[in-house]
Image: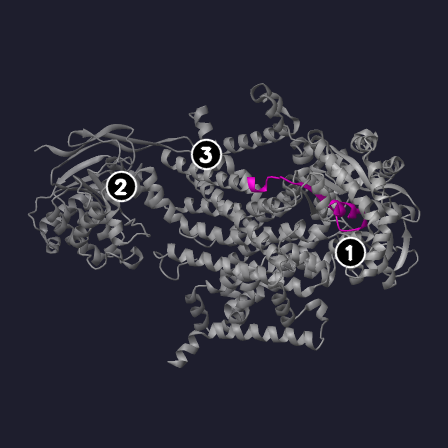
Amino acid sequence: MNSRSIADICRDNERLIIGASAFAAFLVMWEGFSRGWWATLLAPLLGESARALAIKPIFISSPTGVAQQSWTMFAITGEIWPHIAQSGGQLVVGLGAAIVVGVPLGLAAGRYRTFSYILDPFLSALNATPQVAFLPLFVMWIGTGFWMRVLIIFLLAVIPITMNALAAVRTVDPRLLKVASSFGATELHTFRTIIAPSALPFILSGMRLAVGRSMIGIVVAELYGSATGIGIMINMAGASFDTDKVFVGVLVIVIAGLLMTEGLRAIERRFDGWRPAIGDNM
Amino acid sequence: MTPKLVAKDVCLEYRQPRTGDRLLALDRISLSVNEGEFVSIVGPSGCGKTTFLSVVDGLLPATSGEIIVDGLRVNKPGPDRAVVFQDASLLPWRTVLRNVCYGLECIGVRAAEARERAMKFVQMVGLDGFENSYPYELSGGMQQRVNLARALVMDPKILLMDEPFAALDAQTREYMQEELLRIWEQANKTVLFITHQIDEAIFLSDRVIVFSARPGRVREHVTVDIERPRSLKLKRDPRFHALEDRIWSLIHDDALVQARS
Amino acid sequence: MYAFSRRFFVSLATGFAIAGAIAPACAQTTFKIGISSPSVSILSVYFAEGEIAKKHGLNMEVVSAEGGTRGLQVLMSGEIQAMHVGLAPMVQANNKGADLRMIGASLNTLPFVIYATKKSDPPIPKGSVIGISTFGSETDIAVSIVLRNMGLTRKDVEITQLGGTSQRFAALVAGRAFAAPLLEPSITAAEEKGFAKVIDLYEARTPWVFDGIVIPREWLAKNQQTATNFMKAYLEGTHKALSDEKWAKEVITRRLRARDPKVVDFTYKDYQRLMTRDASVSIPGAENVFARLKEIDLAVVSDKLADHIDTRVIDGLKKDGFIAGLEKQYRVK
Amino acid sequence: MQGDALQRYTPQLVGAAALLAFVSFWEAAATYKLADPMFISSPSRIASVAAEMWEDPDFWRDVKVSSTEFIWGYLAAIAVGIPLGLAIGWYKRVQYALGPFIDVLNAVPRVTFMPIMVLWFGIGIWSKFAVVFLGAVIPIILSTYAGVRTNEARYLRVAKSFGASQMKTFKSIILPGTAPYIFTGLKYASGRALLGVVVGELYAATAGVGHMIAQAGNAFETDRVFFGVLLFTFTGLVVTTILARIEKRFDRWRPEGAVR
């Protein structure tokens, strides 16, 4: 088995190698801009205009700056934890409410035609609106606190969940429904044994979309808010020119977003085991 | 008679990316096809028939050995060879006529002329009236006719057919076999036909080449000494059955050997 | 591959060409100054705008940047050339690596009056919502100082960004905030509403560089003349407003959208009372800013005045008699 | 015949009736003070505000600013996103190099960058342009890439077998096969672009419809806020309708009903 040459190994891990080196190059570029490496390096070549290549850390921070700031905020002062807890709490409540409301609503609209006729105009209108435009209204109604942010997250998340749940019922194989009704299954039984299992993957992918959108909710709702929350932290850091901190906040959101979508994807794969791979579908 | 197509000691080796193992798919294939001849290749599944066809077409480079068409060595696809693909592989966003035009466009024939020439072949395969339909509107058999017309319009020296009727139901397949013979006689082409259906190979061909299981090797050449034109009645002829038995036992032996080893 | 990659780069180049084509449209030919919100302290900027600026060879534009610290961000982006903002947020920006200078001050005292929607004991209970303009701005710092004097920290209350004084007042009316620092004309409006005065910072006459003209050092070095022209216009606007009450009130009515003559009247009085006549930055005020910033745990990298304040423009105008000339011309003392 | 027509338009009729009921209830709630109209406004108040604003040049300036941000940001995202998506799908190595960055950018709501955008580009159109661009470009890249990727190998083999040039392959196989995916991406991106406009203007702006909404919210002018929100709804609907129209033209070859 030792027939693999180094060239072979490089070829087989090309993806990792290229990806990692591109990322490393990006970090070095970034660090170089904020430390003025490129300005010094290219000064003999470009003369005076090379100075434009040195960018103050206040504008772009730097990888080491972000790393250092992360260490401080996570491990030394621990100041980031309350922000994460606050935003996480809003996310859980808002997203939870969106699931509790959206899934039954979508299932019902998918199953009962007349109900979908009623729901449809509202749903499409709401879907076409950038829902964050409701922010000033919500602020007027319930202030800038916890519940306003939950409401925005809810509104952003409930739409993809409802729409996917609706689509999920519509794609249930009609033959299966025929089987159920020929066996005299009750409505509840049909839902439980036919509709729910075949709709689940769609609903889960709706949730994945919803997670992404509720992250928007967190960030945007906290533009207005106060005290604690990742969005607030970013906003305050921006206002006090703490660009390192801004990037730490962005990093937290990136990681949270990746974790949640990957987690949901894993769950999707688990529930999707019975479904044969379909090449033509997206 | 000089052979139209010659394969000389064609070998093909793959490298599996995960394990780095090397895998021999084709082992010293040598064969020749004469001008105007209809030759079929049969063999157990996975024996490398389709792979061999790709090498002949020039889509895959051979690891060693060579393919010679009209005395010239082949190393890439060319208008002298045209493939009729297994799944019709019609471009779903083009109409029937524009699908048939496709190959002509690729070699830079003017649009108007391409259309005119394509139309002739659409008629030849019996699809006039459907030239502006999209593939999804056609049945499987009709799609294969378009596939065939798309290859014929190129006026290739050799037609390479890769199990073109495999996906069709039994009746349509037999009907298409007859149609193919009719069109072949009309167009007068050299054909290299790949199939795993023994009866199809015998019915269509002048000669059947039997491949062994992986790695693909030429096991035997079987000449089909039955007069033309042929009709489906031939399939009940004792000579036909004798040939069928012979080829079947060749393949069967091989499958057994493979299973034991 | 070749043909495709060529096509790709052509498209990319087209994209950049489009971007490039729009860019020059935004190239600045005017002197843009940002303001945080319309209030008394920026009136001098409005007085300088238009006729007077033109007289000094300046094509001037006033841009609302909605909040002091946000204005500084805008200033650093290069979209505007000057920002009308307090010394404290500017010093904070310099701490983080910005290179800004204040070349003149309009207000050298803290003029806020903090109002609460109702009287209570203590005047600001724990957990109440306090409105400020933006984080890190003068209102934020003023609130921090007041909280500290009451024995509270920022964590004991909820501080929320509301924007300028009129927006803060609207939030008080709507019950969205319990207390907020206000300026005229909102102070009078708050009195009329019967809101409770928590503390009058103006009465205490705290020396404080509350508002001034802030310019990036680099830009200033290259455009000394433009900066001087602006300060000339600014000073002439101030002097004209102090002497020509009718004209000043017209500008106030127009720019602050104040329809009520009573409001215009006390806004003008406030202006007379508060404005620094010669636009010089108060040294005790600046020192107080440094001291208080340190007190509320905001690091001050350098408290050397020269690292934050550039007096050369005003000194020059004093020396060549420009200010004395204005005083004579408009008979202002 | 009449019964047929009635049946055919049942969805629209029921939908319209539901909307009408909603609007009437809203109006009634405001008229009979079931809730304070200062908070909930009412359809008639919104209509009169709309009429008022129609005459207001400031409103048209806001519309102009917002549409400039939207249109240029969106167009730039298309101009960059489609070629980049194609390149990532076409060249394996480009995908390896750029994939990680795009994944990361996709995981973070691009509006998070607003504080940095203001620092880089100021408070005017450019910071919003940047946020709109960033918001829209990622879905366009991702769906274009997915489109190229799902292009079936068999069509590519056909092209290769007929000796098609790279250009020909690209035009005849890759583009038509990718078009439906690109449209999915464009539709999604239009929502993201609009979101960018709103958030950018709520965060920091001197003009624009989002800025108008924020100002109106601060001043408790609920009617104006609702009018602004409806304006965005309308814009969103118009944009998706236009895209659906264009898509239909590209989609004639698809069997009806199989359209995603």
Visible in this render: residue C110? yes
Of labels 2 and 1, the one closer to you: 1
Q: Is residue B215 above or below residue C180?
A: above
Does residue C121 appear left or right of residue A114 in this picture?
right
Instruction: Tell me the tag on residue D93.
Output: 3
Q: Decide: marks 1, 3 in contact (CB < 8 A)? A: no
Disc 3, SS: helix
Q: Is residue A277 above or below residue A246?
A: below
Give the residue at x 52% y 45%: D137
Q: Is residue A21 left or right of residue B17?
A: right
Of the 4 image quadrants, the one containing the C terminus of chain D is bottom left
Indicate yes or no whether the magenta region holds residue C47. yes
Q: Which residues are magenta?
A: C24-48
Element carrying mark 2: helix
Q: How many marks?
A: 3
Report which residue position mark 2 lands on. B106
Count residues near mark 2 (Cα–Cα under 10 Å), then give few for <14, some for 14-19, many for 20+. some
Q: Is residue D233 magenta?
A: no
Dot in front, 2 or 3: 2
The numbered dot on residue C166 is 1
Marked residue chain, label 2? B
Question: Given the image, on which type of amino acid does mark 1 rest?
Answer: Ser
Question: In this view, which residue lies farthest toward the front?
Answer: C329
